[in-house]
Amino acid sequence: MIEIKNEVCLQGVYSFKEVIDNVINILNVHNFDFEIKLILSEALNNAYIHGNLRNVNKPIFLRYFYNGKKVKFEVEDSGKGFLSESFKNEISDEKLLDESGRGLFLIYNLSDKLEIRKNVVFIEKDIF
């Protein structure tokens, strides 16, 4: 049985793409690379913008776990946390093409499970 666990500490936004590509390569989940790239891009950008308030000195932790069937991500920022579940609601047509405000909605719809506890976003995606 395959099992991969790892944690990456990020600061700023300069390294997100490289880290995401590296995670996909380590996990060897290229059949799901579009979904995983979008999920992680949105989660990491959300942590940087909303959690860390664009402060490049505050860390973001990306933890990932893979057992051959399911990949789990945890994205932890240095913010106060988020309690709303409004990301589960449908997005209005007028906001569908906005540049912001869709991150958690996209993650929710591309993943199999999304949960937020304080300043940590937990994401699960079935890979089979």
Image (cartoon, rainbow, N blue to C red):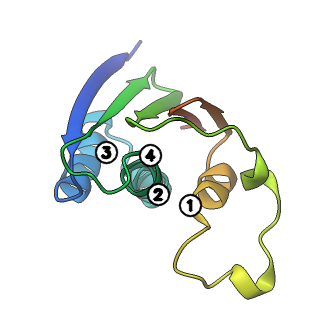
Q: Amino acid at mark 2?
A: Glu
Mark 2 residue crowding within 10 angstroms, few (<14) / some (14–19) / many (20+): some
The answer to whether residue 36 is above or below residue 38 is above
Instruction: Using the image as rendered, state which of residue 117 and residue 69 is in the foreground.
Output: 117
Residue at x 69% of width, y 37% of height = 83
The residue indicated by pointer 2 is: 42
In three-dimensional space, the C-alpha distance between marks 2 and 3, rounded to whole angstroms, equals 15 Å
- Above or below: residue 103 compared with residue 47: below
Q: Earlier in the sequence, mark 2 or mark 3?
A: 3
Can you identify the residue that label 4 sits on?
51
Q: Nearer the N terminus, badge 4 or badge 3?
A: 3
Residue 96 horizontal side relative to residue 7, left or right: right
Q: Are marks 2 and 3 in contact (CB under 8 Å)?
A: no
Residue 36 spot, x, y in % from top left:
45, 51
Q: Nearer the viewer, mark 4 or mark 2?
A: 4
Amino acid carrying mark 1 in the image: Gly
Disc 1 marks which residue? 103
**Residue that lies at the very extreme toward the top in this rendered image:** 1
Secondary structure at numbered mark 3 = helix
Of callouts 1 and 2, the N-terminal one: 2
Q: Tell me where residue 98 appears, x and y as whole percent.
A: 59, 82
Determine the residue positioned at 26% across, 51% down: 55
Look at the numbered disc 1 and give the secondary structure of its residue.
Answer: helix
Residue linked to disc 3: 24
The answer to whether residue 128 is visible is no
